[in-house]
Each structure stands twice: as C-alpha cells, then as structure tokens.
C-alpha cells in the first residue's frame, strides 16, 4: 500500500491512499477527547461531536445532513477518550463536497443556543439508554476504578447535571483550548490523485489559523488494585477483571495485542471461549480487551454468567492466566496465533472506511502508517519468551482490579 503524506503550513497533516474504487472515504481526526476535559466540562468532547452538526455560518442543520445524503453519501462522527473524528463516505466525484463539509462544520459551526439546549436532551436520553445496558456500562465503570480521580477514568457521555450547564461559550472555549492544528490529520482513501487531494485540503483547511498544542496531558500514576461489587437488578451477573497495561508507544504493545487475541479475542477458538463457553457452558459472552492510550493502557477480561457460576468461571480464568505466566507456549501454538491475528488484520483492512480511520489515527500518533508487510514483520518477531514475559507483567492476579454487577 502506497501511503502518501503532506503537512499544511498550519500543521494539519494529510495521509492518502489512492485506490480504484468508485466509493471514497475521508475524515478528520483530532487528538482531543474526553480526557482533555476540565472538571466542569465532563461530557463536553462528546457534546461537541453532536452540536457541530447543528448549524454553520452558511448552513442550517438540515443542509448539513443533506449535503452528503443528497448524493448517496453519509457523514458521521465519534468521540473517544483521546480523539474526535468526523468522517464521510461518498462517490469519488464528490471529494470536494466532502472535504468542504468537514471543514465547514469543524471550523464554522455557530452553536445556536436553541440547538444546544435541544441536543442536551438528546444526549441525556442516550445516557439513560446506555445505563440500561450493564454489559456496556461495566467497561466505563471499570476504567473509573483503575483510573480513579483522573480525566481518563471519566465516561465519555458525561452526566445530565453537567450537560445542562453547558453554554455556547463553554463549547467555543473547549474547541479553542483543544482543537490544535498540529494535532489534526485529514485521512483519505479513494480514486483521486494525491496532488488534487492536497489542493482541496489547502483550499479549505489551509485557511485555518495555526493553533499548536503547548501543554502535554498529565497522567496521575495512583493505581491501587481494588475489588468492587455493585448490586443491580440484572438477570445475569456481570464481571470484569483487569490491570494497567502498556501505552500505545510501548514496544511490547504488539506482543500484548497477540496475547489478548489468543486469550479472549473475537474468535470462538480463543482460550477462554473454548473453556468457559464450549467446554463448561458457563457463559454466552466472554472476551478480553487491551486498550492502549498515549501514556498508559489497560487490559481486562469480561464475562456474564449466572450468579452460581461466578466462582467457577473466575477459577478457570485465573488458571489460564497462570498457565500463560508459568508455562511457555509451544512453537506451533505461537505460529498459529500469529497467523490468526495477521489474518484478522488483513481482512479488516479490506473495509476501506475502517482502514481510512485506522491510517488517520496511526499518522496522528506515530507520524507514519505501517504497511501490512511491516505489521507482519513485527508480529513474526514476537518470541515465546516475549509472550511469557508480558503475561507475567500483565496477568499477575495480585495487581488486578475486579468489578462485579450482581
């Protein structure tokens, strides 16, 4: 894959992959998310993701929504702990339409107070819906547990009390303080030459005034393992166990990604799925997850089961942890695991919309994008000893926190 890169004078970076498809994808990724909120701004990053669609200097909300949909395209956005993204899919002849719209809503939104007030109620309903799903809610509450008293531990949606206080000025202040031009990437996959893509980006994003980031994020290293039980009216008991893990720049990140995939990845043949689901029938859903951030990360295992199976399930999980820590993998096991994860990565890269966002995030964080060949090489370099060392660092039960809904 021939990725091409460019940086505008104001610091906004471009990454593009030219393809022959009739469908193209373009997005803007900003290195600003919920962890960048001040105490009184809880939920602001996600709130802005909503209200940037509510009117610009030249467009009403309906015209924003219709701009891409009128030509069969779509526009969407998401917010995470560390990033905000606005992205669109469209026919290749509508590149300028897409780029101009992303620029317009990002830098020319006017945030009418009436629309702000209406959107508050929409998000409050979103929060209520989210709280009705314990299998989702437990992940956020687990992060609150391990990143206690830190912005990184706060949930992305916020809460009704803080949301209702937000004003247009609050929105504009957050954008000014966190939407830094040297922390933005415009990513694209489609049938357009790189030269034309640069010209379109320069035409719109080139007029944005430079606003470089001056201050780094601060992480408080105050993790203390904790076990917490929350009583909820649920049919299942929900359980999550985990530990702090490597940040996105750590050289052991790819090894932990491989270990995570072996242990409880999406395949039904993961170690935990084969034992707890296939062999004993204790669970319907069990998964492990590794989430790296810019300066830290966390690893967790989640499952839902009948309350009578909690202790038995936890014993089996601990047994798998101990096996990985104390018994080295066989060379055949490791080879199979490497093939599996590379196959998953390669297949996922065929989804151009997801790939567009992935290359944008990679360029945002590392100022480069690895090809599939480079990714494969990194996977192949992982050794049996690497996996055991990582298992001993991350899967030590004495360092793990637990959260139980029952």
Image: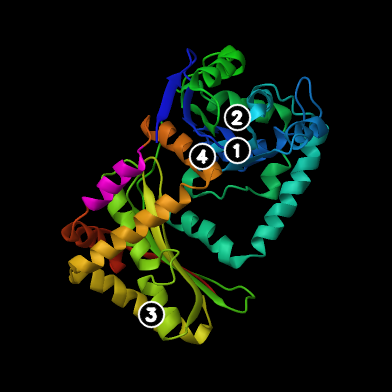
* Residue 372 falls within the magenta-colored stretch: yes
**Badge 4 vs badge 2, beta-carbon distance below 8 Å:** no
**Badge 1 vs badge 2, beta-carbon distance below 8 Å:** yes
Q: Can residue 217 be seen here?
A: no
Q: Is residue 343 left or right of residue 90?
A: left
**First in residue order: circle 4 vs circle 2:** 2
* Residue 264 falls within the magenta-colored stretch: no
Q: Position of residue 108 (x, y in %)?
A: 69, 21
**First in residue order: circle 1 vs circle 3:** 1
- Judged from the image, the secondary structure of the residue bearing numbered disc 4 is helix
- Judged from the image, the secondary structure of the residue bearing numbered disc 2 is helix
Q: Position of residue 123 (x, y in %)?
A: 72, 48
**First in residue order: circle 1 vs circle 4:** 1
- Judged from the image, the secondary structure of the residue bearing numbered disc 3 is helix
* Separation of residues labelled 1 and 3 (CA atoms): 40 Å
* Separation of residues labelled 3 and 2 (CA atoms): 47 Å
**First in residue order: circle 3 vs circle 2:** 2
Q: Which quadrant of the structure image shows residue 261?
A: bottom left
* Separation of residues labelled 4 and 2 (CA atoms): 23 Å
* Separation of residues labelled 1 and 2 (CA atoms): 8 Å
Which of label 4 and label 2 is nearer to you?
Answer: 4
| Residue topped by disc 1 | 45
- The quarter of the image holding the N terminus is top left
Residue located 72% across and 29% down the image: 168
| Residue topped by disc 3 | 275
| Residue topped by disc 2 | 174
Which of label 1 and label 3 is nearer to you?
Answer: 3
The dot on residue 357 is 4
Q: Which range is magenta?
A: 370-381
């Amino acid at each position: 894959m021939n990725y091409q890169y460019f940086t505008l004078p104001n610091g906004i970076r471009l990454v593009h992959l030219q393809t022959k498809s009739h469908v193209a994808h373009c997005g803007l990724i900003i290195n600003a998310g919920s962890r960048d909120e001040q105490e009184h701004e809880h939920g602001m990053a996600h709130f802005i993701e909503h209200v940037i669609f509510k009117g610009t200097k030249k467009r009403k909300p309906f015209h924003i929504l219709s701009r891409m949909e009128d030509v069969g395209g779509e526009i969407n956005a998401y917010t995470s702990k560390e990033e905000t993204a606005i992205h669109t899919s469209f026919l290749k002849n509508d590149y300028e339409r897409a780029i101009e719209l992303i620029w317009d809503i990002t830098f020319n939104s006017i945030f009418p107070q009436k629309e702000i007030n209406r959107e508050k109620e929409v998000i409050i309903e979103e929060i209520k819906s989210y709280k009705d799903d314990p299998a989702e809610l437990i992940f956020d509450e687990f992060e609150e547990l391990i990143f206690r008293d830190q912005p990184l531990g706060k949930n992305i949606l916020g809460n009704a009390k803080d949301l209702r206080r937000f004003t247009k000025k609050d929105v504009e202040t957050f954008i000014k303080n966190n939407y830094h031009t040297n922390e933005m990437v415009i990513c694209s996959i489609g049938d357009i030459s790189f030269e034309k893509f640069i010209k379109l980006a320069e035409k719109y994003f080139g007029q944005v005034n430079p606003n470089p980031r001056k201050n780094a994020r601060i992480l408080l290293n105050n993790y203390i393992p904790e076990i917490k039980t929350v009583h909820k009216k649920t049919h299942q008991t929900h359980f999550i166990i985990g530990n702090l893990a490597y940040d996105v720049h750590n050289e052991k990140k790819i090894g932990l990604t491989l270990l995570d995939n072996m242990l409880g990845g999406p395949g039904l043949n993961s170690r935990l799925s084969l034992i707890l689901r296939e062999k004993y029938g204790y669970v319907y859903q069990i998964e492990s997850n590794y989430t790296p951030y810019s300066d830290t990360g966390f690893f967790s295992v989640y499952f839902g089961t009948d309350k009578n199976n909690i202790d038995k399930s936890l014993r089996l999980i601990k047994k798998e942890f101990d096996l990985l820590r104390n018994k080295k993998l066989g060379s055949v096991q490791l080879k199979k695991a490497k093939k599996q994860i590379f196959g998953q990565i390669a297949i996922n890269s065929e989804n151009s919309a997801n790939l567009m966002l992935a290359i944008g995030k990679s360029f945002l964080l590392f100022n480069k994008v690895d090809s599939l060949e480079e990714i494969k090489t990194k996977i192949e370099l992982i050794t049996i000893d690497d996996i055991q060392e990582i298992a001993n660092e991350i899967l030590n039960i004495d360092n793990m926190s637990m959260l139980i809904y029952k």
